[in-house]
Amino acid sequence: MKPLQVVTPVLLLALCTSVRSQDAALRAKAKDLLDKHKESIVTVKVVTTTRYIYLGRETHKQENKLEVSGTVIDPSGLTVLSNYTTDPFSGEEFSFENGGDKVDFKPETSVSDLKIVLADGTEIPADFVLKDKDLDLAFVKPKEKPAQPLPSLAFAKPAAEPELLEEIISIGRLGREVNRASCVKTGNIEALVKKPRTFYVTDSNFLGCPVFNAKGETLGLAVMRRSPIKGQNMFGGASQVVLPSEDLLEVAKQAAEAKPLAAKANPPKSEEVKSDVNKAESKAGPGAEPPPVGEKGQ
């Protein structure tokens, strides 16, 4: 028994020391990532007008002045953000029962002003160039080419697939009320969603901002995953998830070549750009696996 009484405290001390060392390493990596990439995390100022259409007529409209976070992914200023943060209804239609009749209700949102606000406060007029409602992505681009390349973050697929409970690091930017300070969180992957496409559910992230693994590799972008809106439920279910880097990159290639979207409320579906993985899901059904990145849906 004596050897056990001596060894057990030693083992416990070694274990605690190891855990503290791992925590210190994760904190150090988080601080390093924030210092390296904080200028790539920007604020996007948006002025929108939402018109509420009832029985085919506008009942009222509302102007909203928003500030949301985005990530510059190319020195040209191409910036990605969560579409949900600027247009939560994005072309949805709702139906209500009124005296036994089905009545349609439709909100329409248009953008009247859009600016990218850099870390130093510089404001750059910009346009939306692509929106992907299914992936909750929106891309904006400066109206004019910046005089100097902008600080940007290059997303890339990590070397290994993420694992459940793997440690993660999220960086972001806070609101105007706290001087748009850069911020960082550490956390874990709580769930790995594989169908209808891959998402990672984490316990800490900032919408429109990057999420890294403990090695500093980009896992993906924090977005909102929504269930279909039906009937009178205007909000449905929604969860913050991480869209894998490879899916983001596929859509970003299209955004880099896209022209400014028409300045009108919710363009028809023919004007929406969909990724190949979205097309494959539509054909195969909601329970099917998406095709590998780089392959076309058949």
Image (cartoon, rainbow, N blue to C red):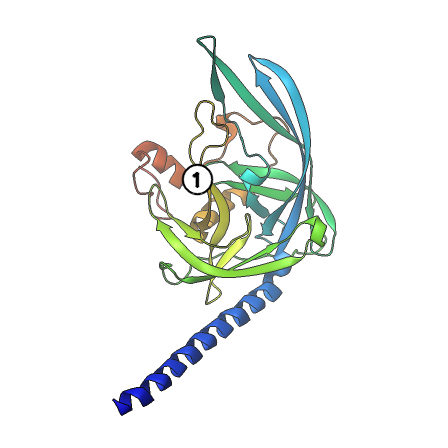
Q: How many marks?
A: 1
Q: With respect to residue 112, does 198 lie above or below?
A: below
x then y, percent, for residue 69: 61, 48
Label 1 CA crowd tier, 10 Å (few <14, some 14–19, many 20+): some
- Report the residue at 55% width, 27% height from top: 267
Which residue reaches farthest front?
1
> Is residue 86 toward the left or the right of residue 275 in the image?
right
Which residue reaches farthest left?
1
- Report the residue at 50% width, 56% height from top: 211
x then y, percent, for residue 87: 57, 34
Q: With respect to residue 236, does 165 lie above or below?
A: below
In front of the other: 72 or 197? 197
Quadrant containing the N terminus is bottom left
Residue picked out by circle 1: 275
Q: Is residue 75 visible?
A: no
Quadrant containing the C terminus is top left
- Report the residue at 73% width, 56% height from top: 120
x then y, percent, for residue 119: 69, 56
Secondary structure, mark 1, is loop
Q: Is residue 270 visible?
A: yes
Residue type (three-letter) at the residue carrying disc 1:
Ser
Q: Quadrant of residue 164?
A: bottom left
Q: Quadrant of residue 281?
A: top left
x then y, percent, for residue 169: 50, 61
- Report the residue at 37% width, 62% height from top: 160
> Is residue 156 toward the left or the right of residue 279 in the image?
right
In front of the other: 268 or 43? 43
